[in-house]
Image: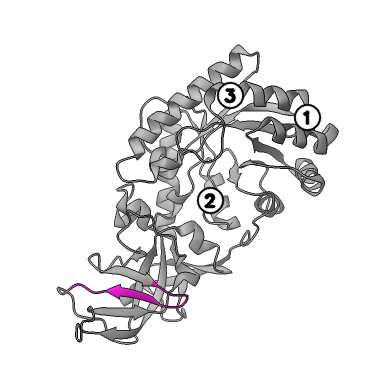
Amino acid sequence: MNHLIPADIPTPAILIDVGILDRNIERMAESMRSRGISLRPHVKTHKTLEIAAKQLAAGATGLTVATIGEAEVFADGGASDMFIAYPLWVDARQAERLRALADECRIAVGVDSVEGATAMGRQLGSAGSRIEVLVEVDSGHHRSGVLPDEVVDVAKAAADSGLNVAGIFTFPGHSYKPGMPSGAAGNENEALAQAARELTAAGFAIRTISGGSTPTALIGGETAATELRPGVYVFGDAQQLELERCIWEDIALSVAATVVSRHEARGGNVRRVVVDAGSKILGSDRPDWATGYGRLPEYPDARITALSEHHATVVWPDSEELPALGSRVRVIPNHVCLAMNLVDEVHAVQDGAVVDRWKVAARGRNS
């Protein structure tokens, strides 16, 4: 369906369907409103000021970022309330940057160790009381975070170091596996509830209980969380599609690509085409359960079986005619967060026409 790709766009290029984007933003915002939960979307997914502005206008109470650098970009863009959802190890330079951020906006940061809390307090000095700290809890992803019965030690170290302990957070990242979202949502609720009880019993006033991921955010039912931090929901991607957390019509981001090579099945080779969107725009993320390195919405039975830097090899179904050389197709990346960090700008499209170009303002701000 080449008419979906404006003719004046060179390939490869990222396209954002504005109508689908707006619908995704509003659906998540309405879900959170109906449940009485604050929405603090993770903007590391899109890294653009324009999309963040749409999320805030739809009712988000603030933004989530992954790094101090991302926070600086969005603060410069006018954001007034941010959480760096990461267990920071703060040195003197980072402390200086955090103090500057605290002069511009409300800022909260993560911590998951006594040592990290002590170092942060020492480096921030008197500014520590102006920056909120959330203790990270491991709710089953087993990446960073302490177990729920370990949060008090970290919180006490933070308070003793002059930091403003505001609550707890977790990331149920084990929801990114088939059949796991509902179970991970339950694990998240249990871990947050236990950690909150532990801190309350120790005398801490809990203001924020933060959780959420895109696979779990729209799952209803009980939650201890006061806010959720999904990110990928704005775009959708091939992972969310194969996890059955979105449908084709929910996917707002695609990569426009050109067919540069085509081959019928001869000499032991598979029937395939090659397009000009490789790992340098799609990203190379492929979970062991994924069926390929991305999907083609107009050809749902095709599979990207190999990526090079500038090639994607697409095994073509026998039921479909091979596309002609020079024809253009859309590719859905497995993981949109990686794709957005690989380009300087994206094309906002509506009804087959480019309506704007958005700079990926926080691209590469990894520290």
Chain part drawn in magenta? 307-317
Q: Can you give x and y, in whole percent of width and height, for residue 86 in the image? A: 61, 42
State left or right for residue 118 relative to residue 59: right
Residue that carries the numbered disc 2 in the rendered image: 54
Q: Tell me the CA gap for discs 1 and 2.
A: 31 Å
Displayed quadrant of residue 120 = top right
Q: Can you give x and y, in whole percent of width and height, for residue 16 in the image? A: 45, 63
Identified at 72% across, 25% down, the residue is 157
Q: Which residue occupies the foreground of this view, 330 or 88?
A: 88
Residue that carries the numbered disc 3 in the rendered image: 150
First in sequence, mark 3 or 1: give its number. Answer: 1
Name the secondary structure under disc 1.
helix
Residue type, numbered disc 1? Ser
Q: Tell me the CA gap for discs 3 and 1.
A: 23 Å
The correct choice, above or below, for 95 with respect to 17 in the image is above
Residue type, numbered disc 2? Lys
